[in-house]
Image (cartoon, helix red, strand yellow):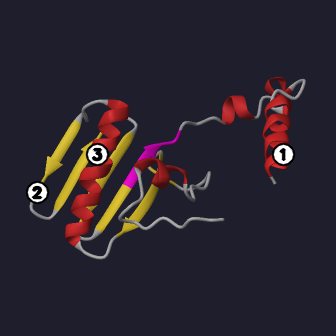
Amino acid sequence: MVVRQTPERASLLDILIDGFEKNETLGQFHWRELPLANAVLAVEKFESLVAEARRWKGDPVRLDAAADRRRAAWTDLDIRQAGRGVCVLVKAPRFDDWWHDSAIWTDDPMGPVRDWVHREHTSTS
């Protein structure tokens, strides 16, 4: 059963994993947009995302707030709010150099993990 998350209840992790495309980058950052119903909800969402990010990453290296917009930034994460929109930008990890190295895939390193997940999934179905 698929559970749909509302923008107001979405966690930072929800936002980071839902829908990123490999080539969806802006200035070396992957980015997700989260439009909310009104500016009050957007400010609340910004504050909750920043609180969550602080638990992961510590204090931001940049924290700006004005009447109509807010920003909290770490070296690899940037959270912004303006009006009723929130944007989360995450520095692209650039896995390409090792991901496409054929030596890393020798002897099927993921096979045991896939088998384990498959066995678990089929035993509970």
**Mark nearer the viewer, 1 or 3:** 1
- Image point (57%, 65%), residue name: 3
- Magenta run includes residue 90: yes
Q: Position of residue 11 (x, y in %)?
A: 41, 52
**Dot 2: element:** loop
- Check the image and name the residue furthest to the front: 124
Q: Residue at x 87, y 29 (%)?
A: 108
Q: Is residue 63 magenta?
A: no
Q: Is residue 58 above or below residue 65?
A: above
Q: Nearer the viewer, residue 4 or 66?
A: 4
Q: Is residue 92 above or below residue 88?
A: above
Q: Is residue 66 left or right of residue 78?
A: left
**Residue 50 marker:** 3
Is there a contact, CB below 8 Å, between mark 3 and mark 2? no
Report which residue position mark 1 lands on: 123
**Which stretch appears magenta?**
88-92
